[in-house]
Amino acid sequence: MIFADVIVDISHENLDKTYQYIVPEELEKKAVIGALVKIPFGRGNRLIQGYIVGLSEVPNWDLKKMKPLQQVVEHGVVIESQLISLAYWMKENYGATINDALKTVIPVKKTVKSVEKKYIKRKRTIEETVAFLEQSKKKNHKGRARLLEVLLEQEQLEYQIVVSKFSIARTTIRDLEQLGYIEIITEHRYRNPIKQIDRNFVPVSLNEEQERIVSAITADYKQNIRKTYLIHGVTGSGKTEVYMSIIEMVLAEGKQVIMLIPEIGLTFQTVMRFYKRFGDRISILHSRLSQGERYDQYLRAKRGEIDIIIGPRSALFTPFPQLGLIIIDEEHEGSYKSESVPKYHARETAIERARMTGSSVILGSATPSIEAYDKALKGEYQLFTMKNRAGKGTLPTVHVVDLREELKSKNRSIFSRKLRKLMQQRLEQKKQIILFINRRGYAGFVSCRSCGYVIKCPHCDISLTYHKDGNLKCHYCGYEVAMLQQCPSCGSPYIAAFGTGTQKIEAMVLKEFPGARVLRMDTDTTKGKDGHEKILSAFANHEADILIGTQMIVKGHDFPEVTLVGILAADLSLYAGNYRSAERTFQLLLQASGRAGRGTDSGEVVIQTYNPEHYSIRTAAKNNYTAFYQEEIAYRKMLDYPPVSHILAILVTSKEEEKAIFSANYLKRAVEEELLLKEKVKLIGPAKAELSKLNDIYRQILYIKSPEYEILKQIKNYLEGLVHYSDAMKKITVQFDFDPMNS
Ligand code: ADP
Ligand code: ZN
Ligand code: ZN
C-alpha cells in the first residue's frame, strides 16, 4: 500500500503540517509528488484541495483511521506543483527540511497588514534610559540592555531589524514597551515601488554584436529549442538592450519572464529603462517591500496581471503560469547564493526551473563566474561574447601603481603620486572621480601596537570596527562599546584603529583636496529609506566631485561625467582567505574600472597595489578575462577546488562549544565509516569556522571534497538522516553548503 503526505493550504504559515492519506490503487500512477488532490478533511469529511509532498510505504499513524485520497485533480500543470517539485529538487541538491525548502519557494501569507512598517522608538530621556540600562545590566537582562544600548545610539529603528539583526526577542520589546521605555510606531507606506511612469521610449537600433545574439536566441526560441546561454560582454557592451529585445520576443510568444539582478544592483536608472519600454506589465521586487507587498506581487503574477518580474534571488520563484525565460544579470554575484537553508544557488536552480517549465535561461556578466565560463567552454551553455562598448564611451586606460615603490620614495599618503595628479586634473576640468575601497569598514579593526592583540566582539569572534563617533561596533550583531584606552591583554596604551575605511578616506580627501565636494557611500550612509538612491542621484546630478565607496558603487550605474576611477588598495580582497578571493578581486577590479569613461570623454583607472605581479591584478589591468580564467582554472585544478572538484561544507552549531566539537567529529567518523571504500572523497576538519562564534553560538566546520557532486549528495542524505534520528545530535544545528561562496 502507498501513503501520501498531503499539505493542505500552502499559502499559510503552518507548512509543517502534513496529513497522511491512503492512495487508492487506481490512483497510484497519478498520485505523484506535487500533484493537486482532493481529500476528505475534518469531521464532516468536507472535500478540500491539497498537494502531495511525500509518498511512502509505511503509515505513520493508525491505519484504521486513515482516509483515502478522493481524486487527483491535476499534476504537473498547476504552478504550485511545479514549485513543490522544485522545492524537492532543492532539498535533494542542497540539503534542508522539506518545510524550509517549501517556505523558500512559496511565500508565506502572513496576517499582518501589508502596507505598514513598524519602528521602535526610545521614549525616555537619555539619562533615564541610561539609568534603566544600568539597572537591566545588574539584573542580567541582556536583551533589554542590548536594545537600550542600541536605542541610545539611534533613537528609532525598524522593528524587523531589531528582531533579526540584533536578535532581540519580541517579548523583550513588548516588556520595554509596557514599562514605558520605548514606543512602537507604525508607518503606512505606499504600495507601488515606482511612482511616476514616464513612457517616452526611444528604441536604440542594435549594433552588430547585439543583433547577432538576439537573432540566434530568437531563432532557437521559435524552433522550440531551449538552452542556457552565457553572454560575456564587457561593461557597457549593451547586454541590457539585448535582454530587453529578447524579453519583447518572449512576451510576444505569450510567455512570461523573470529577470534576476543582484541584491544591490537595482538602480533607478535600470528600473526606468524597463518601465519605459514595458509599462506596468512589470513588477519589481526589492528588499524594502514588506511581506504583504511581496505576497501581492506573487498573486499578481499568478493571476496573469504582470508578465515580467525583476528582483533578487527570491524572484526566481514567481508563479508565472507560462514561464518562458529566466535572465540572470551579473551572474557572477555572490548574492545569488542563499545564505540560509536551503543554501541554493540561483543559477543552478533557475536552470532546473527552466527545465521543468520549458524555458530558456540567459546568464550575463562582464566577468562570468569560473563555474559558468567553464560550463560554457564545455558546451553546456552557449557562449556569446561582446567585446566593445555599445553606446558612447570606450574602455578606459588602466595604470597600475606599485605601492611599495611609493613607500620607498617616502610617499606615505593613501594616494599615489599618479592618482593625486590625475585627481587634481579632474577637479580642475570639473569632471567626476570615483574612489573605490575594497571592503566596508576596513577602517577597521583595532589592535594593540605593542602585543598585536585584536579587539573582538564578545558575541561573535569578529573584530570590532572603529567608527568616527568614537565607538567600536560589531557589524554582525550590532554590539557597541566605546573605544578602549588600554590593551585588554597587555595594558599598553598604544592601541589604534588600523587600515583605511571609507570615513577615513573621506577625511584624507578633504585634507588633500580642500574644496572638493565629496559623497560617501557605505552601509552607514545608505541606511535610511532610499539612502542609496539619494546618494547616487546626487552624484549623477554632479552635486559632488568625488564619490567614495565600497562594493556598492561598482554595480551597473552609469555616470557619464566620471573619467577617473581610483582603486585605493586592490589587494585587500586577495587576503580574504578562501579559494574564491582571486576571482572576487578580479571581478571587483574589472567592475570598478568599468565605471570610468562611460560618457564621451575617455576614462582612466589607477589601480594601487602591493602585488602588481599577481595574476588577478595583471589580467584585470589588461581587461583580459580569458587570461584570468586560464590561470584561475589551473589553480582550481591543482588544488581540487570547484568547478573542478566539489566541496560540501557542513556547519555544526551549538550553544555549547564542547557539543559542537563532539558532534562535528561524530559526523566525520560517520562519513569515514560509511565510505571506507570510496577513494574519491577527502575530509578536511572539523575545525572552528572562520566566524567561530556568532551571537554566542559556537560554529564548527567540516569539509568534504569530491569530484562527483552525486557522492556529496549521498553523504548529505546519509547525514541528514543521522542528524534527524540520533540522540547524540540533539541540541545542535547542522547546515549543508555545497560549493560555498564565502569559505
Ligand atoms: P550593459 O548592460 O552591458 O552594461 P547597457 O545595455 O546598459 O550595457 O548599455 C550601455 C549604454 O549603451 C547604455 O547607455 C545604453 O543605452 C547604450 N546602448 C546600448 N546599446 C546601444 C546601441 N545599440 N546603440 C546606442 N546606444 C546603445
Ligand atoms: Zn557581534
Ligand atoms: Zn597589548
Image (cartoon, rainbow, N blue to C red):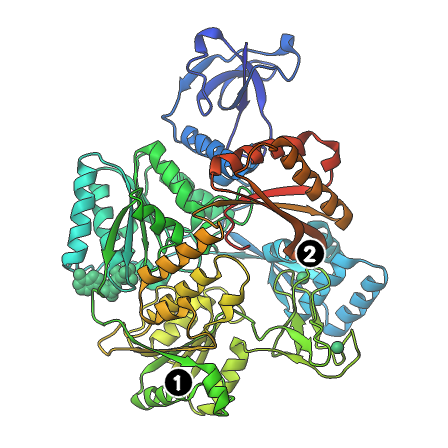
Question: Spatial distance from mark 2 to mark 1, Cα to Cα?
Answer: 40 Å
Quadrant holding the C terminus:
bottom right
Q: Tag 1's secondary structure?
A: helix
Residue at mark 2: 693
**Residue 272 screen position, x and y as percent:** 30, 60
Q: Taking 666 as reference, is 570 above or below it?
A: below
Point out which mark residue 224 bears. Answer: none
For the point 44% across and 65% down, the residue is 585
Q: Residues within 10 Å of mark 2 (few under 14, many from 20)?
A: many
**Residue 523 screen position, x and y as percent:** 52, 67
Q: Tag 2's secondary structure?
A: strand
The amino acid marked with disc number 1 is: Leu
Along the line of sight, which residue is nearer the eye, 342 or 630?
630
Q: Taking 609 as reference, is 655 above or below it?
A: above
Q: Residues within 10 Å of mark 1 (few under 14, many from 20)?
A: many
For the point 39% across and 22% down, the residue is 75
For the point 26% across and 57% down, the residue is 239
The amino acid marked with disc number 2 is: Lys
For the point 19% across and 39% down, the residue is 220
N-terminal of the pair, mark 2 or mark 1, is 1
Q: Taking 208 as reference, is 87 above or below it?
A: above
Quadrant holding the N terminus:
top right
Along the line of sight, which residue is nearer the eye, 391 or 609?
609
Ligand 2 closer than 8 Å to label 2 CB: no
Point out which mark residue 419 bears. Answer: 1
In which quarter of the view is residue 85 placed?
top left
> Quick check: marks 2 and 1 in contact, CB under 8 Å?
no
Which quadrant does ligand 1 occupy? bottom left
> Is 84 positioned to the left or the right of 449 in the image?
left
